[in-house]
Amino acid sequence: MATQHTTEEVLLDVKGISLSFGGVKALSNISFDVRKGEIRAIIGPNGAGKSSMLNCINGFYHPQEGEITFKGETRKQMQTHKAAEQGIARTFQNIALFSGMSTLDNIMTGRNLKMKANVFWQALHLGPARREEVEHREVAERVIDFLEIEQIRKTPVGRLPYGLQKRVELGRALAAEPDLLLLDEPMAGMNHEEKEDMCRYILDVNDQLGTTIVLIEHDMSVVMDISDRVVVLDYGRMLADGTPDVVRKNQDVINAYLGVTHE
Amino acid sequence: MTGSTPNSGDRDTFPKLLLENVRVRGNKPANREKDYGIWLTWTWSEIADEIQALACGLKSLGVERNDKVTICGDNRPHLYWAFTAIQSLGAIPVPVYQDSVAEEMQYVYDHAEAKFAIVENQEQVDKLLEIKDNLPMLKTIIYNNTRGMMHYDQDFLHSYKSVQETGREYNTKDPDFFLSSIELGNGEDICAMLYTSGTTGRPKGVMLSHNNMAITANNGCIREGLGEDEETLAYLPMAWIGDNIFSFAQAYCAGYCVSCPESSDTVLEDLREIGPTYFFAPPRIYESLLTTVMIRIEDAAKIKQAMFHYFMGVAKRVGMDILDGKPVTITDKLLYGLGKILVFGPLKNVLGLSKIRVGYTAGEAIGPDIFVFYRSMGLNLKQLYASTEASVFITIQPDGEVNPESAGTPAIGVDIKISDNGEILFNGPGVFQAYFKNDEATRDTKTKDGWVHTGDAGYMDAHGHLRIIDRSKDVGKINNGTMFAPKFLENKLKFFPHIKEAVTFGHERDFVTAFINIDLESVGNWAERRNIAYSGYTDLAGQSSVYDLIQDCVEQVNRDLASDEKLAGSQIQRYLILHKELDADDGELTRTRKLRRLPIAERYADLINALYGDKSNCPVEAVVTYEDGRTDTIKADVQIRDAATIVQQAAE
């Protein structure tokens, strides 16, 4: 579904990325770009290197070769906190929330990087720290309103059903007001209804907040429905790159997904 | 409480009452709403300003006197303001149930000849766009929440804010318009048109005048001594007459503040934060609150359980007397006081009910156990007998004379008579004007001198209290000669926390049978504690251990009935647990959750035949309608069981 606000401006450019762990080649010579305002999907069978790719983008893994350009700034290696400061936020395949903390507090942690007051003021909860907290709370509340999770604002996330936890995790990423949002299997393990809800929120984030999104997903129908362009990986190699229609007809992709007899 | 009655010339309509409230208490809070986690407050002066802007905006969009303007959405201050804004133009607000599916909505819009719609959000706009082609009268749609509306470019769509901006411009050009338009109105004008949910046939548009609503509302305030300091939470559907009276009309008469919850899912938490002093809830809300309490108590530590049960025992013995101001022994008083500190106080606080002075319930009969539970904790819960055609109040239980069986004494200004065939009729200031475009129904329901047929059977007892037996048109006869009062039996079943809904059959049959809907929350918790696995309602409802549980309830009802000479013949001989929950979206319940017997009987004819046959199971398929209008089929094999009946001992 091509959205009209996608521009030609490239937000993220990945060039010739190769990553290996010892003898295992996780990614070899991957290149693609992400345009500002689009929903970009990365798909592929298990072990194709999708999560590794995301980990490279947000600086968790350091690829041996290649370079990544984000907002015009080129880098070979990146620290995760720098990536976050530059405006990249992500969610994880396995939920990584603070299960004893409330939904609101979890979402507030997404604001952590933007808190400038020093420990002294924060400890006293006075002066600049207090003013700041009010601002950050407002952002957090907007996220809560956006994702319609008012009723669980004060519930410890450990007590929430899986689908809602996923939504809280998305909320925490949104609280950082990112320019680029990386979603690692946002719909894994969800039932049909939860998936539909999540799709709606992803489209809304893209549409109303103007956030560029890179997502990894197994569910092909979801990917084909909501993304503007798709990259297909298999065994660390790039098989295809293009609009859902183009990718769907690509013979290599069909082989990778449906299997092919090796002579 | 304000001094004069609302029907005197300068305060005989709600827009005039608004101006009065601005004069008397302009800086007092009128509305609150929780937004982004914070309670926002509007004073009477502020809401008057908002209403004026909206009214002028509607005027510039072309709203004329007597035009119908629909209002549809969750309880929001902006939608309540729409009522007054529409009324100040002499137009007529028509609130619509926000959970109606598009088809039901189309009927109401079409029948009401609505030209304008004010709705809450994208969801409601989408529903209207779906049916708009079939509604040639509908010219303009105004939406309050702009979320998701960015790409809608139809020129008949306007945001609430933009309409208000246009209104503010209009007001600078013609500053006298708003007040002079209000002056044109009087108490005889139609104040609102409400569609009754209709247990039979299509909904009817009940037209109520300003006098109807304002006088009735004011009388209600006088009866309970309601003043400007009351706190209420508006959470029931705006299309229902009760919400119109409690959250709008009475607030305008007494000048109290109405708060709107953040969303329909946060009501319980908002209730706790607001701490209402005046509260209305249908029995099912009190039931579900009690069910939550009981589930949590069963999960609590032994010592807490013991404390709860001990002090609830004390409360059951003396709590009602203490609330009614009757004498009790010193020991009991002390024990009750201790219970208040340790159990009742904290419990009421958790439920958000600790400040309640007046708590009403109506719509359906409330189970005596539930009623006693709340009253014995010191909550002044009272039943009232209400009807849309009466602008709510017909009878109210007076303080100090509350008993679970009666519906109370007539409200101020209301007369009651019982016809020869036992039907209750009432007359009073709230009697509706007519059904819109339905003279035949009006003639059937309302006599020339203003008496309204309720369709309910009842009698006045020796203390002047009204007692209601059943809806007279539902009461029938079993072939063995016993009277068949379905609602009476169903209520007895529903008083068990495990049973959510029941439908009984017996008219012109040899014996009585029943459909049961289990309460998923309560039975689900019961099953969990016994390690019974289930995948959903249909699965749980079909399990034989659940049947055993329900069997006990049914047989308990039979034992109760056996001791009643008149009703011993209406014991339930066979029953089944329905494979799906009865739902308003499937046309089985009304939007206020009353049974629609005819559609149920038609839809489940096979099951009814099986109940009167000799088989022990019956395969069924049922079509279910999802909220977005899509349909699906549920297949199940429903078990049918016999329940033991008790033979009445021959009187010797």
Image (cartoon, coloured by chain):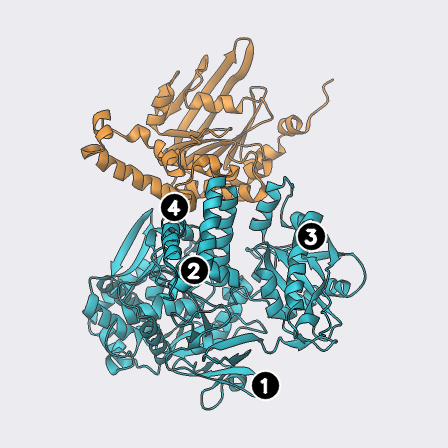
Chain colours: A orange, B cyan
Q: Residue at label 1?
A: B421
Residue B239's x, y, as percent?
44, 67
How many C-alpha atoms fall within 10 Å of the one at disc 3: few (<14), some, or many (≥20)? many
Badge 2: chain ID:
B
Seen in the image, is B84 located left or right of residue B282?
Answer: left
Q: Amino acid at mark 3?
A: Tyr
Q: Residue at label 4?
A: A145
Gap between marks 4 and 1, in whole Å?
56 Å
B92 relative to A144, above or below: below
Seen in the image, is B165 located left or right of residue B134?
Answer: left
Q: Are marks 3 and 1 on the same chain?
A: yes
* Viewport quadrant of the N terminus of chain B: bottom left
Seen in the image, is B379 located left or right of residue B644?
Answer: left
Circle on res. B62: none
Q: Secondary structure at mark 1?
A: loop
Q: Amino acid at mark 4?
A: Asp
Q: Secondary structure at mark 2?
A: helix
Q: Are marks 3 and 2 on the same chain?
A: yes
Q: Are marks 2 and 4 on the same chain?
A: no
Q: Residue at label 2?
A: B318
